[in-house]
């Protein structure tokens, strides 16, 4: 029942924050912090308990919760945890704490309702990473949508309603396509076996005609591609990031985008292995286009948050490339990239929020020379900018290196083109660092440097990036068994020598 507890703690904590805030605002913040912190401790306990422990080859899940729910439709409340889910849950609760801390002084209106929506978004993300029944997965997929709409639409910036509505329409319409695909897959499974079910493990063995497989894969893929986002389904992302409050941007970049990548790995590859192999060259090409497109557009931005938003399009292109490269090395690199990107880009959005709070602007032209007045904050900003462009020794480099190494074995020409994205990343990384922190202090700015709360946010993020960059083996050991199983189901003929 520990998996169900992870979700219930967030739902109850969010509701309690909303109720308590009517009498005491500070208590609402602490309740939210305690709820996410409790989930982080529970998840760390699971990770520590399973570190170094050998498991039978037939044991797919580390933890499982499975009981009947709507039996007449074959729906069970089935939650399951493997290494992939475990790593992403650790990222979820870590960034959840970062989001709460970053909103401590920024959010001053309707504080209780803000934390209610924030924790319910985290509950939806938790359910997405745990669901082993496709109906339950879709339920949590939609649960993420409404609270995030409110986070952007109520506490966002000038064009928040436009950005929130655009986000809602893109994700809702693509989600409906996935719902149609889920129901169709269950019906086809019933025709083949006589059993109507939404259970993930049973649906893995469904026999599909080539035409049906392509159509159903398309329904899943579009929903995940919009959330990732994949070019050209990305247009909601810059607006949502730019207008969202800092906590909303952290959750969007660090977690919601990862649910799209998770869906590709967990559902598209194993459920549609033949179609995944057939469309892999096209998907890799789209990933490379996203790498270059996002990086080039990031270089041309003048709004700090919009620049960081376009870097996400580029980084998620590496994830798409790794997912469809057809070997375990690239797949492991894609997940490492997901985790590292969540931390480094989340930190860049926190920095953008701190600067906007101090300067009341996001325009890079209004900044410059901040190292003179804020050397510690500027040093942290430089480190996160270098992480984003893939500096060796930091987490993003490990992910991108593994993706390119694996992709090189699959398609040399596409990999060579993808490396040009690293050159463009250098340009936007230098623009961020030079335009904001270096150069003369032409505007004669005098601003406070890092405060204790800001150290509490950015310090652990720096340590995590250094840890993944210098010693990624514990993370890889956690991911490898589950990724190997999913890769083998999609690309059984591929054998990669390490």
Image (spheres, grey):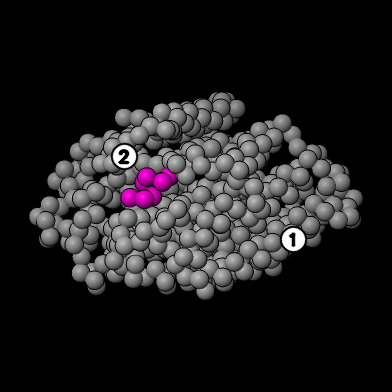
Q: Is residue 484 magenta?
A: yes
Residue 421 in the image: above or below residue 461: below
Q: How many marks?
A: 2
Q: Residue at x 47, y 44 (%)?
A: 476
What residue does disc 1 label? 431
Q: Visible in this render: residue 392? A: yes
Left or right of 368 in this view: 384:
left
Q: Quadrant of residue 83?
A: top left
Q: Which disc, if any, is residue 61?
A: 2
Residue pictured at 50% horizontal, 66% vertical: 408
Q: Nearer the viewer, residue 411 or 358?
A: 411
Residue, x 78% and y 40% (percent of image)?
A: 376
Q: Horizontally, is 107 left or right of 430 in the view?
A: left
Seen as rendered, the residue at the extreme front is: 497
User: 94 left or right of 328?
Assistant: right
Residue 18, given in percent of the width and then of the height, sits at 49, 33
For the point 52% across and 47% down, the residue is 339
Q: Nearer the viewer, residue 259 or 335?
A: 335
Check disc 1: other Cα within 10 Å, few if <14, some if 14-19, many if 20+: many
Q: Position of residue 163 (x, y in %)?
A: 55, 59
Closer to the observer: label 1 or label 2? 2
Q: What predominant SS class does the magenta segment belong to?
A: helix
Magenta-highlighted residues: 479-485
């Amino acid at each position: 029942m520990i998996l169900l507890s992870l979700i219930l703690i967030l739902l109850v904590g969010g509701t309690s924050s909303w109720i308590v805030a009517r009498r005491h605002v500070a208590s609402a913040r602490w309740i939210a912090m305690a709820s996410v912190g409790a989930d982080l401790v529970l998840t760390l306990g699971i990770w520590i308990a399973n570190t170094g422990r050998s498991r039978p080859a037939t044991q797919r899940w580390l933890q499982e919760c499975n009981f009947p729910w709507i039996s007449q439709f074959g729906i069970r409340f089935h939650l399951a945890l493997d290494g992939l889910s475990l790593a992403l849950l650790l990222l979820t609760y870590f960034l959840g704490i970062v989001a709460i801390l970053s909103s401590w002084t920024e959010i001053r209106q309707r504080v209780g309702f803000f934390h209610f929506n924030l924790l319910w978004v985290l509950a939806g993300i938790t359910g997405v990473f745990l669901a082993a029944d496709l109906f339950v997965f879709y339920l949590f997929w939609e649960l993420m949508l409404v609270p995030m709409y409110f986070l952007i639409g109520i506490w966002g910036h000038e064009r928040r309603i436009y950005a929130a509505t655009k986000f809602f329409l893109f994700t809702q319409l693509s989600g409906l396509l996935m719902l149609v695909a889920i129901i169709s897959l269950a019906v086809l499974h019933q025709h083949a076996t006589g059993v109507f079910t939404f259970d993930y493990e049973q649906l893995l063995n469904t026999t599909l005609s080539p035409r049906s497989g392509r159509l159903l894969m398309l329904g899943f893929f579009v929903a995940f591609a919009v959330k990732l986002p994949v070019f050209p389904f990305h247009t909601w992302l810059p607006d949502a990031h730019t207008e969202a409050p800092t906590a909303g941007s952290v959750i969007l970049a660090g977690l919601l985008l990862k649910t799209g990548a998770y869906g590709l790995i967990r559902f598209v590859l194993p459920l549609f292995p033949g179609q995944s192999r057939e469309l892999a060259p096209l998907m890799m090409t789209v990933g490379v286009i996203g790498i270059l497109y996002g990086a080039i557009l990031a270089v041309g931005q003048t709004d700090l948050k919009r620049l960081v938003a376009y870097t996400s399009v580029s980084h998620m292109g590496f994830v798409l490339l790794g997912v469809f490269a057809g070997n375990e090395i690239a797949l492991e690199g894609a997940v490492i990239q997901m985790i590292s990107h969540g931390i480094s880009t989340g930190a860049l959005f926190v920095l953008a929020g701190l600067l906007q709070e101090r300067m009341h602007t996001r325009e890079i032209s209004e900044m410059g020379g901040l190292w003179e007045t804020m050397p510690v904050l500027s040093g942290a900003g430089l480190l996160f900018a270098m992480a984003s462009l893939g500096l060796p020794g930091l987490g993003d480099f490990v992910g991108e290196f593994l993706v390119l190494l694996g992709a090189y074995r699959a398609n040399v020409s596409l990999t060579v083109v993808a490396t040009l994205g690293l050159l463009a990343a250098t340009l936007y990384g230098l623009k961020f660092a030079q335009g904001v922190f270096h150069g003369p202090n032409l505007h004669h700015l005098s601003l406070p440097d890092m405060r204790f709360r800001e150290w509490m946010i950015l310090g652990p993020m720096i340590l995590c990036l250094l840890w993944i960059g210098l010693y990624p083996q514990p993370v890889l050991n956690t991911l490898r068994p589950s990724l190997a199983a999913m890769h083998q189901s999609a690309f059984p003929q591929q054998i990669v020598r390490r």
